[in-house]
Amino acid sequence: MGTDFPQKWRSRAGWVLLVLLALRLVAMVLIPLNDTTEARYAEIARKMLESGDWVSLQQDYGIPFWAKPPLSTWLSAASMALFGVNEFAARLPALLLSLASLGLVASLARRHGGRDGALVAALLLTSSLLFYISAGAVMTDPALAFAVTLSMVAFWRTMARARPYWGYLFFVGLGLGLLAKGPLALVLVALPIGPWLLLRGKLAACWKSLPWLRGTLLMLLIALPWYALAEMRTPGFLDYFIMGEHVHRFLDSGWRGDRYGFSHATPLGMIWIHAISAWLPWSLAMLVWLLGRRRMIPALLRHDGDGYLIFLALWSAMPLLFFSFSRNIIWPYSLPMLPGFALLAAELWCRDRRPGSGRALPWLASISGVALVAVCVVFVGWPERAGSSQKRLVSAWQAQQPGPSSRLLYWRARPAFSAAFYSAGRAKNVTDGGELLALLDNDSVDFIAVGPEQLQTLPPQIRDRFAEVGRFENNSGPMLLLREQRPGPAPTR
């Protein structure tokens, strides 16, 4: 290995990171909001900004959304207040939170593995599939991942006798986690830390190092006021959110109390499959790497005087063990463990610095970066087909210059949150013929969005008054936009 290799590797790694970030920014601008998750949270944030109610999240006008705390919604609404109501503004907080998580990971890796270790950890985390996708998506998970990462890094720095403010940042992370996802954040932080303290015999040192009284008060000061106000505004919130979303959802695979979607019944242990896919391509690359060094693993693990490797291993594995006992999980649940996994893999690589070993991960990083860039180019090249979104249909409706009282009615279609977002709340779902007739009883030109298979279910007197404007495709199937030809009182049924 020549003396110029480190500089070449650092240059290559820096370019891969820059290209990945640039492509993520482009995708955030060009790819429409996807139904249902991303568009739902963006629309909830838009309603918050429109209504000026920063306490009660709204599923629809006047209907509270109790499933999640407000942190990501606050950030998206504030971003749209600054940059306008658009996809980029709604997604920007997720990117900034992900970059903050990346910075925390790189700073911790640098303390143990130097500049190369920080670059490896940054590349591993940035180019992992779930982290890269969630870094520019309107979801609650990037906020949770940042809060957990902040608490975990702050805990380690505090135990390593860093500056006192890290002890307070540990509790700041917990408070933000309560606002990002709820009590689950406390569990995800306690699960790795508790066993580590027991294995290392550090309980007394932890008690002395962390500012427990002031820190707990700081955590409560951050989170408790919103919880109290939310329950006062919409009584019943705490019971649904604490018991429903944090007990029944994880223990009951057939939970029927979900007010905002459906239960995700999965086999026990499914979280490990989710984690393998979330960590691609590194879940496979690290397996190959470890198999090739299986005889050296004991030597790599031998010098762990401060318990750093054990800490990272517990951070990576304990959340997965916890979710292994739940039958109601989804793919993003594995996101909070990815920073720990990136740090663990980077630390192992840094300890294996024999000749030639340094070439593996940089080249794999370059390959993974190229693969992700290719995926983004495909999405950017055909943004109208990038997922399920009603943006093109709503844009065609807006091009018809509808009047202030004109209606955009979705006939017997699933709730299209993207339609609500792009129409500024004017799109409405209708499933009853009588309601449809009543809504069309006005003097304005109205519009109907309908799937081809549902076209014949429109009342005949409605079909005769509407003509097709266009057909719009996405991966959830085609939709037709119909324009009213003869506005006026709707005929009786």
Image (tube, rainbow, N blue to C red):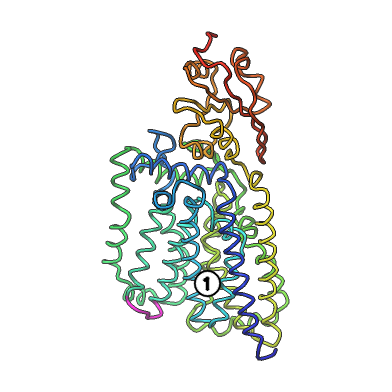
Amino acid, disc 1: Leu
State which region is magenta.
159-164
**What quarter of the picture does the C terminus occupy?**
top right
Q: In the image, is residue 90 above or below residue 146?
A: above
Q: Seen in the image, is 381 located left or right of residue 232? A: right
Q: Position of residue 225 (x, y in %)?
A: 28, 51
Q: In the image, is residue 181 above or below residue 7?
A: above
Q: Residues within 10 Å of mark 1 (few under 14, many from 20)?
A: many
Q: Position of residue 137 (x, y in %)?
A: 53, 52
Q: Which residue is mark 1?
A: 312
Identify the residue at the far top of this view: 492
Q: Residue at x 61, y 66 (%)?
A: 19
Q: Position of residue 170 (x, y in %)?
A: 37, 67
Secondary structure at badge 1 equals helix
**What quarter of the picture does the N terminus occupy?**
bottom right
Q: Seen in the image, is 243 located left or right of residue 286? A: left
